[in-house]
Amino acid sequence: MSDHSVRDLSSIDSDSIHGFQPSINENEEHSNKTLERLVTNNKGVDDIITRLETRAGQLGPLEDGIDIHEVATHAAPDSTFHPEDKWHYPIDEETGMRIVQFIENDEKDPRNWSNLYKWFLTFFLGTVCFDVAFCSAVVTGDVDGPMKTFHVSEEVIILTVTLLVIGFGVGPLIFAPLSEEVGRRPVYVVTLGIAVIFIIPCAVAKNIGTLLVCRFLDGLFFSAPMCLIGGNLAEMWRTEERGVAMSIFSAAPFLGPVIGPLVGGFIGWRWIYWVLLIFSGVLYIAMVILVPETHHQTILKSRAKKLRKLTGDETYRAISEIKLRTFKEVANETLLRPLILLSEPIVFLITLYMSVIYGLLYMFFFAYPIVYMEGKHWSASKTGLMFIPIAIGVIVATVVSPFFNNDYNKRAQKYSNRGELPPAELRLIPMMIGCWFVPAGLFSFAWSSYPSVHWAGPCISGFACGLGFNLLYNPANNYIVDSYQHYAASGLAAKTFLRSMWGAAVPLFTIQMYHRLGYEWASSLLAFISLACCGIPYFFFFFGKRVRAKSKYAYSPESAKHEISGAKDAEKVGSSSLSDEQ
């Protein structure tokens, strides 16, 4: 490793820097003690950690960057290589350790896999995400079935959706940081396996309690793909390549739920779970066989461990093995930091907007049966067909996403040519266009939902909503990531948690709202709320830079340059002092 591998230290994967897993295995314990000896009073290691924590600012250690960022290493002049080390890692002059990183054209680096293989994994992982989202709403295709079987009210059956979506919100707080410690693949293998198993008691449930508990557990364990697949894609695709891949992933949370009622309306409620079991089981087996580990630091930790075993040299270490990570640090980054970021105007308002959109999606699963089954006396299967236009809208938004991605790249290039970072607000342009489709679709749905009006009116309205949903979702995520680059994971965790809680709550009052306000005014109320939200992307497009400048936690190129130059000045002072002493 040489100077040409230097990258911005401020963006290094700090979760990985602080991530090290103790083991009860004696060899692992010996390795831990050896590591402690290597890093104690090691000025090179201390300098790396100090610079990272200085860059982190108010909220503590930096989080995992979207890409792995390499540490600047300087090969010692007298460095030798072990014959078993085919990667030829030299001894780092500053730390005295052999820092294990990806080398040029490294075949184990997911970014160097063939495009064909990466696209296969992208579509497969998108299908897994679709399956998880499908699971949340497929049960709405037959609400009457479990009501009659268990002799309970409609509100109780709606809890099968609510509890699952609550699980979607809680799970990422556990599984996202866990995947940074042990890797993506082990989390998938365990959580999806458990989720598939808990579908079985749903299908054979003898009482409502069993059904509700197992639905919550399914939501909890099925949440892993929803929060981790974005990381898989970011680890495979370079920044300039990942726009289309991320749009495919972003479509799944909307496409899965709207296809759910379409399928569920044609089969009985127990068969809904058997079909879900078959679909999820096949995908699980395929995932275990086909999906490799993509988390960079997990791959490198495995390589370092292998080299230590082959060579007997304990100085082989991945970046994530440099320092032990305390429980307090894990708890702070997992639970406290997302709550702190919710006090930020950008995170709060964007999260509020996405919560409204997510709630509207789940509202449709109960509003459509009211309009078509109660108002027009349609069957559940026929009503399920009305969700097709929403799905088409989501697909169209996915198809046009490369256009917006190319537009962003062109606008961003102008800043890059001047040596500047593109402003985060460039991400908002698709939102500024897509935001108007949602209220337009809702107003159309509201005033064409009279029983006497042709069924095509409210049906076609779904296209505009589906188009708007997907045009809003991905840019919103990108804006949070670009605004809080060093705390992006916490910002997205805050958004996911609040969004899921609201999505879980909406089904509980949708039916009552439509019955008391009427079809027209209930939908109009939601249309007015979504219309008010249209001001959010415009506000941040024009004033977002000022908001970020006043923020304690938002990322800005100016603060980054200041902190990096400060760190470099400190290094110069240290070097000068050392020379004086000598």
Image: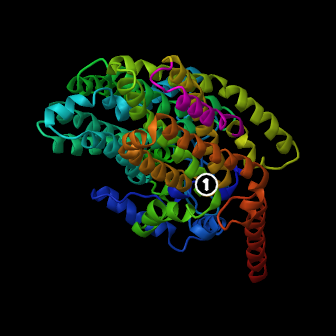
Q: Residue 126 location, x and y as percent?
A: 48, 29
Locate residue 536 relative to residue 215 in the image: left or right: right
For badge 1, the amino acid type reads: Leu
Q: Residue 558 location, x and y as percent?
A: 79, 61
Which is the main secondary structure of the residues drawn in magenta? helix
Locate residue 404 relative to residue 440 in the image: left or right: right
- Residue drawn 68% across the image and 26% down it: 402
Asked whether 69 or 508 is in front, the reply is 508
Locate residue 108 relative to residue 218 in the image: left or right: right
Residue 441 belongs to the span the image colors magenta = yes
Residue 19 belongs to the span the image colors magenta = no
Asked whether 337 or 88 is in front, the reply is 337
Does residue 78 appear anywhere in the picture? no
Does residue 344 appear anywhere in the picture? yes
**Residue at the left extreme of this rendering:** 206
Location of residue 365 (image quadrant) = top left
Mark 1 crowdedness (10 Å alpha carbons): few <14, some 14-19, many ≥20? some
Locate residue 222 relative to residue 64 in the image: left or right: left
Q: Residue 368 location, x and y as percent?
A: 42, 29
Task: Give the residue pinned by disc 1.
Answer: 349
On screen, residue 48 above or below 220: below
Q: Residue 468 location, x and y as percent?
A: 61, 33
Boundaries of the magenta span: 432-453
Asked whether 186 or 73 is in front, the reply is 186
How many marks the image carries: the answer is 1
**Residue at the front extreme of this rendering:** 452
**Residue at the right extreme of this rendering:** 418
Asked whether 39 or 508 is in front, the reply is 508
Q: Label 1: state its secondary structure.
A: helix
Q: Quadrant of the C terminus?
A: bottom right
